Image (cartoon, rainbow, N blue to C red):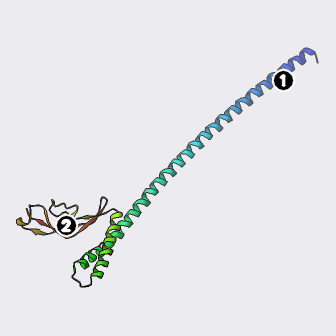
Amino acid sequence: MSPKKEKEILQEETAVAEEVQDMMEEVQEDELTKAQQQAEEYLNLAQRVQADFDNFRKRNKATRAEAYEEGARDFIKNLLPVVDNLERALTQATEDESFKTGVNMIYRQLLDTLEKRGVEVIARQGEKFDPNLENAVMQGTADEGEPGTVCTVLQKGYKMGEFVLRHAMVKVVEE
């Protein structure tokens, strides 16, 4: 073979090798681009899953807190008749002053505990009747006060924060 022919073959082989090299680089670039896109998709997916989990955790925490407060309110509602009975016991005449002092101490301790938990008494005698806080069970006369006001509290009501645990039973002056 002539040197010229060899040179042509060598140039042709070099051109083919360069062409193959270029094709391989293109394939590698395509694969790299696809891999980067896939990595971005996985990262976005992971971020969404993490955000969803954070939202779930926050909702779950709020739900647990709400359930705890609801349970506390239900328990306190069950204690209110005990408070009423202690109040009745304190109004009874007795010769045993130490017994009465003991009952009074228990009563005060129970009220202090309820107060620490945020329980407030609804006793609005002399104020305008509010159906959101009170149940009117009797009507009073005009000489008992101004029309539309609470003239007598028959049973105390209680609320805890924004929630009414028990409406006060009241006598309201008729309008």
Left or right: residue 111 versus residue 145 is right
- Secondary structure of the residue carrying tag 1 is helix
Residue 128 falls in which quadrant of the image? bottom left
Which label was assigned to residue 71?
A: none
Name the image quarter holding the C terminus.
Answer: bottom left
**In the displayed structure image, the side of residue 46 where residue 59 appears, left or right:** left
**Distance between the Cα atoms at labels 2 and 1?**
102 Å
Q: What amino acid is labelled 2 in the image?
A: Asn
Given residues 139 and 116, the one toward you in this image is: 116
Residue 97 on image: x %, y %: 27, 81
Q: Quadrant of residue 43?
A: top right
The image quadrant where one finds the N terminus is top right
Residue drawn at point x = 44 percent, y = 60 percent: 64
Quadrant housing residue 3:
top right
Give percent across and percent down for residue 88.
24, 77
Look at 16% across and 61% down and name the residue there: 129
- Name the residue nearer the viewer: 96 or 74: 96
Image check: 81 left or right of 44?
A: left
Image position, residue 107 (x, y; %): 30, 73
Decide which of 126, 14 is in the foreground and name it.
126
Total numbered labels placed on residues in the image: 2
Q: Residues within 10 Å of mark 1 (few under 14, many from 20)?
A: few
Sequence-earlier tag: 2 or 1: 1
Classify mark 2: residues with Cα within 10 Å, few (<14), some (14-19) or many (20+).
some
Residue drawn at the location 37% of the way across and 64% of the way down: 70
Relative to 85, say whether 120 is above or below.
above
Extreme-right residue of the structure: 1
Indicate whether 64 appears above or below 27.
Answer: below
Q: Which residue is mark 1?
A: 13
- What's the residue at 38%, 66% (across, down)? 72
For residue 85, side relative to residue 5 (left or right):
left
| Residue identified by numbered label 2 | 135
